[in-house]
């Protein structure tokens, strides 16, 4: 009798574990289907950065240092450096995103700010304020190092962000695919959709929803295999 009860208990556990896994996969597919994408072009990005520079100038804020958060903030920081006539550009690295629509709970600084910010006015740059956690970690770090003032600039802001940048262009709930991360986005989707059992045509159909140019989609789907081989060879 006890054996039978234990056997039924084990079977129930196996079934529950199975249904949990199935439901988790269904939830991931549902979330992926609900994702909306926008893919601004290089020209659109540059026009947005001009508008961003105008906002900063109008506010009469001239930082001593522009700090770009790696990697998304590098281009924002470089172009603003040019448009504002500020040559002092520094770097800080914050690990946050793991994959499409997946983030770590708590971002952490993995590469410290590359300059001494004590008593300096700082403009932090990133492409998007998503949850805002990485921006908060960065701003808190700079203030703890003695920065006189820290302001934040981004191209976009998500409504859920806990940080409202001092300067940003627009707010959106969409997944933004910047021109400097097209391959990263496609390779992530290829892996994710492949694990879900989708074939090549289904993968292409889903990636087409991102508004990435069709010729890029075909090229970078093939490039995924090239880079996988390239990475493997580098390890030997």
Image (cartoon, helix red, strand yellow):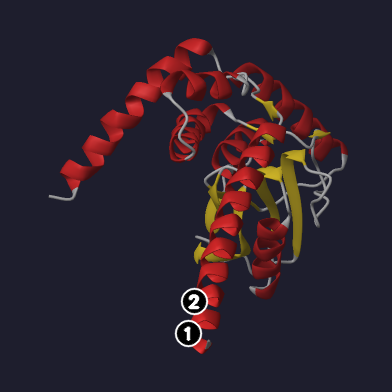
For label 2, the crowd category at 10 Å Cα-Cα, with few meaning under 14, some 14 to 19 and many 20 or more, is few
Q: CA distance from mark 2 to mark 1?
A: 6 Å
Q: Image quarter for residue 146?
A: bottom right
User: Residue at coordinates 59% horizontally, 44% vertically from top-left?
Assistant: 73
| Residue 101 versus residue 205 in the image, above or below | below
Secondary structure of the residue carrying tag 1 is helix
Can residue 72 be seen by looking at this rendering? yes
What x and y, as percent, mark residue 159?
Answer: 84, 45
Q: Please report the residue visible at 72 percent of the width from the left and 34 percent of the height from the top.
A: 34
Taking depth in this image into account, of 56 and 5 the one nearest to the observer is 5
- Residue carrying label 2: 7
Q: Is residue 72 left or right of residue 225?
A: right
Q: Measured from the top left, where is residue 82 in percent x and y? A: 61, 32
Q: Residue furthest front?
A: 1
Q: Is residue 68 visible?
A: no
Position of residue 218 in the picture relative to residue 94 (left or right): left
In the picture, measured across the screen, residue 142 lies left or right of residue 109, that is right
Q: Is residue 214 left or right of residue 119?
A: left
Residue 105 or 203: which is nearer the viewer? 203
Tell me the quarter of the picture where residue 227 sits.
Answer: top left
The number of numbered badges drawn on the structure is: 2
Q: Is residue 51 above or below residue 195?
A: above
Marking on residue 114: none
- Answer few, some or many: residues within 10 Å of disc 1's Cα (few below 14, many 20 plus, some between 14 and 19): few
Residue topped by disc 1: 3
Q: Nearer the viewer, residue 76 or 35?
A: 35
Say which residue appears at 74% left-offset and 33% top-offset: 174
- Residue 69: x, y in percent? 58, 51
| Contact check, label 2 and label 1, Cβ < 8 Å | yes
Dot 2 falls on a residue whose secondary structure is helix
Residue 123, position in %: x, y? 70, 51
């Amino acid at each position: 009798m006890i054996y039978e009860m234990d056997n039924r208990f084990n079977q129930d556990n196996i079934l529950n574990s199975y249904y949990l896994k199935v439901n988790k996969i269904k939830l991931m597919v549902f979330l992926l289907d609900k994702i909306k994408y926008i893919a601004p072009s290089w020209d659109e990005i540059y026009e947005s950065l001009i508008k961003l520079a105008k906002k900063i100038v109008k506010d009469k804020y001239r930082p001593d240092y522009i700090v770009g958060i790696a990697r998304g903030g590098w281009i924002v920081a470089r172009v603003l450096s040019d448009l504002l006539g500020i040559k002092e550009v520094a770097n800080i690295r914050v690990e946050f995103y793991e994959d499409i629509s997946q983030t770590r709970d708590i971002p952490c600084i993995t590469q410290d700010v590359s300059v001494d910010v004590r008593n300096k006015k700082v403009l932090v740059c990133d492409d998007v304020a998503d949850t805002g956690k990485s921006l908060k970690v960065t701003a808190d770090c700079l203030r703890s190092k003695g920065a006189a003032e820290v302001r934040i600039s981004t191209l976009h802001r998500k409504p859920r962000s806990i940080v409202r940048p001092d300067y940003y262009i627009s707010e959106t709930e969409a997944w933004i695919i910047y021109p400097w991360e097209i391959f990263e986005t496609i390779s992530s989707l290829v892996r994710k959709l492949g694990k879900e059992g989708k074939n090549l045509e289904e993968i292409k159909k889903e990636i087409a929803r991102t508004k990435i140019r069709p010729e890029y989609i075909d090229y970078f789907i093939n490039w995924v295999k090239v880079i996988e081989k390239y990475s493997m060879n580098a390890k030997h």
